[in-house]
Image (cartoon, coloured by chain):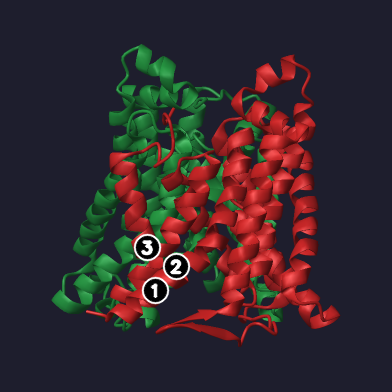
């Protein structure tokens, strides 16, 4: 049985890393909620966010905590182009076709990263990487704290955008009822492209923000995608607050799993959570109806 | 083509494939083994992914479970892989039934199933990596004895015939499904699940059945994988690249058609082998997966039915599947 300090440390780490999970999942659930498309390339987009931050740090000397905005902008463009050139062509096709298409995009992104950066894990150095604060018996990684704060701020900004701006309202309208939104004159094409862009920007920013904390390699995209899928199903597909809370919850569960079981088994914990949710509450914790 | 002409053509192709090893060199035989084996896996996937229209993106899980089961049984209990193969198939079928149960339950949309198949394959990989009893991250190595009782052959041509037989077996199962009521139910579910249920088709039951058959067959393939390659690595046998290898052939060839997976394998397996031989050696290890990615995108956008239905229309054959 691990002692109380370890458990407290696990709880704290779980919450702090949860900000990144939430941001990833919010991006995925936004894309899904607005156009009912599962972005299978989500994790690979995140990996590109990480490598862009790495390029910024090693080539231009920019701290990832500054360059995450640039990474988000580039990923926004990638998401926009993906939607316009590919996903937008087959919005009415069966969902398997959309998933296959995104699986193709995922393969291209992952292996392009492999060709460009090689298979060995890298890590981005930030001045904050080595700093720690002590809160009584537990310590706080300053980098993790900053990552958490920025991720939280971005999620809140997105929420305000969706609630307060015209484009955000059209996005929610298009998510609610595509034809209804068309009828009242919404430019659904534009809304979809922007929504995909924002979803990709979220996960790109998440990648840049997490790059000073964990080492990464091109092959990490799939597990990031699977983690995002887990969270989004647990929170309720297409549900933004659900994705946010789900991110914190899954991160906490994984962190405690690492304390009580073994660090390498943390995926097993979130996965068991997913199976339990699917068995007893298939619409997710915050979802309304599954169909 | 008439039914009769089809039969004659089929028999001629079959005779050719049976006689072919007499004239081929060892590299060409290896290439054909590759073609048949992936055609077999693609056909097994086709049962649930093509005919039933339930996209599984994690079929590597069943190859891996089948492979580990028969390899462990052979190494620790001394059970011959010829029997272990079916035990592995049964364990894979059980796993398939669990995934199907979770993903097909009423009211859940199809993408839950897709996400579950990927998640289960990932979890199998993590479990295998962390289980020392099955070799953990190092994996399992099978010593080569060349004993046919151990599913090992000195002569590559034996593997050729085994792979050919497996391809024919899976194609036979698919042909049987296509010609019976079960196949019609699956087609109805694939095209419009709500309408098929309104007509009294028990969609959950038939999707479960398709998934169980598909995972059983795929699990049989695991034994071939283990005893042909002599090594099992969790990252390879449960990894997404293998799942992609499995689905891309039927998708390119034509999902839900009898000959689609075979045609797809004849197109893609040599391509994959060439790019592996020429690009991998020069450090371009991801190149053939980029090619697969581009192919997936292109097929979805421009040829969503796949190559076989397109060819069949072009050549004026009757399109007997869709």
The colour assigned to chain A within the rendered structure: red
For the point 28% across and 52% down, which residue is it? B95
A96 up-or-down from B287: above or below = above
Position of the N terminus of chain A by quadrant? bottom left
Answer with the quarter of the image where residue A69 lies. bottom right
Position of the C terminus of chain A by quadrant? top left
**How far, Cα to Cα, is label 1 from label 3?**
9 Å
- Rendering coords of residue A286 (x, y %): 43, 39
User: What element does badge 2 sit on?
Assistant: helix
Circle nearer the N terminus (3, 2): 2
Q: Are marks 1 and 3 in contact (CB under 8 Å)?
A: no
- Rendering coords of residue B239 (x, y %): 47, 64
Q: Are marks 3 and 2 in contact (CB under 8 Å)?
A: yes
Tell me the residue that label 3 is attached to: A253
Would residue A115 be seen by someone viewing this image from the given angle?
yes
Q: 10 Å neighbourhood of mark 2: few (<14), some, or many (≥20)? A: many
Q: Which mark is residue A14?
A: 2
**How far, Cα to Cα, is label 3 from label 2?**
7 Å
User: What element does badge 3 sit on?
Assistant: helix
Q: Which mark is residue A10?
A: 1
Q: Is residue B299 left or right of residue A96?
A: right
Q: Nearer the viewer, residue A228 or B87?
A: A228
The colour assigned to chain B within the rendered structure: green
Q: What is the tally of numbered marks visible in this picture?
A: 3
- Rendering coords of residue A210 (x, y %): 61, 70
Output the chain of dot 1.
Answer: A
B139 up-or-down from B171: above or below = below
């Amino acid at each position: 049985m691990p002692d109380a300090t370890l458990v407290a440390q696990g709880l704290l780490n779980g919450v702090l890393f949860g900000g990144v999970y939430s941001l990833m999942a919010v991006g995925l659930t936004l894309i899904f909620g607005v156009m009912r498309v599962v972005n299978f390339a989500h994790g690979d987009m995140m990996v590109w966010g990480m490598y862009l931050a790495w390029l910024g740090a090693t080539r231009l000397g920019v701290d990832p905590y500054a360059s995450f905005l640039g990474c988000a902008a580039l990923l926004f463009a990638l998401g926009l182009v993906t939607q316009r050139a590919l996903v937008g062509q087959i919005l009415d096709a069966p969902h398997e076709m959309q998933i296959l298409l995104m699986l193709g995009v995922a393969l291209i992104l992952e292996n392009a990263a492999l060709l460009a950066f090689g298979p060995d894990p890298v890590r981005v150095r930030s001045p904050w990487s080595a700093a720690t604060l002590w809160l009584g018996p537990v310590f706080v990684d300053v980098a993790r704290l900053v990552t958490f704060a920025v991720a939280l701020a971005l999620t809140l900004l997105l929420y305000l955008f969706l609630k307060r701006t015209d484009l955000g309202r059209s996005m929610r309208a298009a998510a609610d009822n595509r034809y209804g939104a068309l009828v009242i004159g919404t430019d659904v094409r534009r809304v979809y492209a922007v929504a995909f862009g924002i979803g990709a920007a979220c996960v790109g920013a998440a990648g840049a923000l997490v790059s000073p904390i964990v080492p990464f390699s091109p092959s990490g995209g799939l597990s990031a995608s699977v983690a995002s899928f887990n969270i989004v199903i647990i929170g309720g597909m297409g549900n933004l607050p659900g994705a946010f809370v789900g991110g914190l919850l899954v991160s906490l569960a994984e962190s405690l799993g690492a304390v009580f079981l073994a660090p390498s088994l943390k995926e097993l914990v979130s996965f068991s959570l997913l199976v339990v949710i699917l068995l007893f509450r298939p619409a997710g914790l915050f979802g309304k109806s599954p169909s | 083509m008439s039914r009769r002409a089809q039969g004659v053509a089929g028999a001629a192709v079959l005779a050719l494939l049976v006689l072919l090893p007499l004239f081929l060199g060892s590299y060409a035989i290896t290439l054909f083994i590759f073609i048949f084996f992936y055609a077999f896996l693609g056909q097994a996937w086709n049962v649930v992914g093509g005919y039933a229209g339930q996209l599984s993106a994690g079929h590597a899980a069943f190859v891996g479970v089948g492979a580990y089961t028969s390899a462990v049984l052979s190494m620790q209990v001394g059970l011959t892989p010829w029997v272990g193969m079916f035990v592995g198939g049964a364990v894979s079928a059980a796993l398939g039934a669990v995934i199907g149960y979770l993903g097909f339950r009423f009211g859940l949309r199809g993408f839950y199933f897709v996400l579950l198949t990927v998640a289960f394959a990932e979890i199998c990989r993590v479990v295998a990596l962390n289980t020392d009893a099955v070799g953990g991250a190092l994996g399992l190595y099978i010593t080569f004895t060349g004993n046919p009782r151990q599913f090992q052959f000195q002569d590559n041509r034996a593997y050729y015939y085994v792979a050919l037989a497996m391809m024919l077996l899976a194609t036979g199962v698919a042909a049987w499904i296509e010609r019976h009521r079960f196949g019609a139910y699956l087609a109805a579910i694939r095209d419009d699940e709500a309408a098929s249920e309104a007509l009294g088709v028990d969609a959950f039951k038939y999707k479960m059945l398709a998934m169980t058959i598909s995972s059983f067959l795929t699990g049989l393939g695991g034994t071939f994988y283990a005893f042909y390659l002599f090594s099992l690595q969790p990252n390879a046998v449960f990894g997404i690249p293998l799942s992609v290898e499995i689905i891309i052939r039927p998708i390119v060839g034509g999902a839900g058609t009898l000959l689609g997976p075979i045609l797809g394998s004849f197109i893609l397996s040599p391509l994959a082998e060439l790019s592996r031989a020429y690009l991998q050696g020069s450090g371009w290890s991801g190149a053939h997966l980029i090619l697969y990615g581009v192919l997936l995108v292109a097929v979805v956008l421009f040829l969503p039915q796949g190559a076989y239905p397109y060819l069949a229309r072009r050549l004026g054959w009757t399109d007997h599947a869709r």
